[in-house]
Amino acid sequence: MVRVGDEVSNKQVIFRDYVIGSPKESDMYLTTGTIKLKVPENSNAVLVKNLYLSCDPVMHFFMRKTTGLSRSGYIFYTPGSPVLGYGVAKVLDSGHPEFKAGDLVWGITGWEEYTLITKTETLIKIQHTDVPLSYYTGILGMAGMTAYAGFYEVGAPKKGEYVYVSAASGAVGQLIGQFAKLEGCYVVGSAGSKEKVDLLKNKLGFDEAFNYKEEHDLNAALKRYFPEGIDVYFEHVGGKMLEAVLLNMRHHGRIATCGMISQYNLDEPEGIKNLIQILYKWIQMKGYTHRNYYHLYPKFLDLVLPYIREKKLVYVEDIVEGLESGPAALVGLFSGRNFGKQVVVVARE
């Protein structure tokens, strides 16, 4: 059993060098260092033992040397240092007045067994432990806040409206679809395999779902599922999917955009056709991230926790064990290898 003040080994996933194009497992490597389990004197840092780590598509941006996000307050990776991302951790020692040893927290941490967190502003104390702790990497963490903000603050579908969700079996999409059903909407989702389509229809309660890889004409597919058009589209894909959606939006439609995964690994992003539909149909298209809505986190918990406890919300996780499994799990997001929210278990307590 480790104690505060001990010097212990610390297994880490290290970022090798800046990435061009698609990230590969070889862009990261596993090593073991040492760490003293004590916060330095007169520091407000927090020392944590990491339990669960989140794999998120946005992490690809942080592997690049330059990006349009570089001035947006994000934390970019440094070659030779641990990969960073959202995670769930247990506080071992703290110089911060809001955290004490034994607290469970979620926020930005390192891909390693132990992390000294000096930028504590992302840390949120976990108050509710009657649900799986891994949920704070997803449904009760960044992905959940993204889905909540996108649905209730940006897209704001009304009862009876027609809702389309792309990448619908992912960490955010699966929640948006369920929120829509709880609010009385008609919901269709798309995903990249038969198994994911079955998940959407049979477990997550979507009215319809289709495999976009089997559709040679996305415009025709959307017309089939939305003969009267789409009121609200939750955009996670971009590219050809967005072009087809624009042709099928209804007047006064809304497009809530928090991702475009088809564009992330391209050297040159694709141009989008049919943008004039925004003018013709008075469509509102808005980009957002969870970071705009952190102030709503208590309100979000008040809504979502009862739904989880009453089993009105289902959350599907794809969990892999061990830091050594992390690079493959992260890279797999970009080929659709994951089945639900991708989580890496570092330790369970």
Image (cartoon, rainbow, N blue to C red):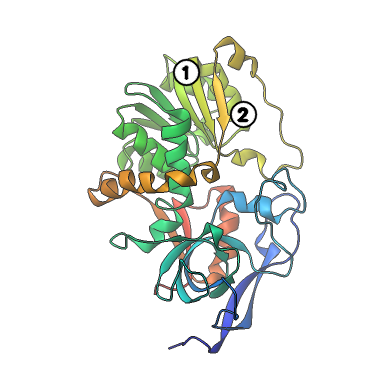
**Residue 16 coordinates in the image, percent (x, y):** 72, 66
- Residue at position x 25%, y 52% in the image: 309
Residue 199: image quadrant is top left
Relative to 255, 18 lies left or right: right
Helix, strand or loop at disc 1?
A: helix
Tell me the residue at 30%/50% (across/down).
305
Q: Which mark is residue 192?
A: none
Instruction: Return the residue at label 1.
Output: 223
Q: Position of residue 59 (x, y in %)?
A: 62, 53
Residue with the mark numbered 2:
240
Quarter residue 331 falls in: bottom right
Q: Image height check: is 337 above or below 116?
A: above
Q: Residue at x 50, y 41 (%)?
A: 192
Q: Quadrant of the N terminus?
A: bottom left
On screen, residue 130 above or below 303: below
Q: Residue at x 77, y 49 (%)?
A: 66
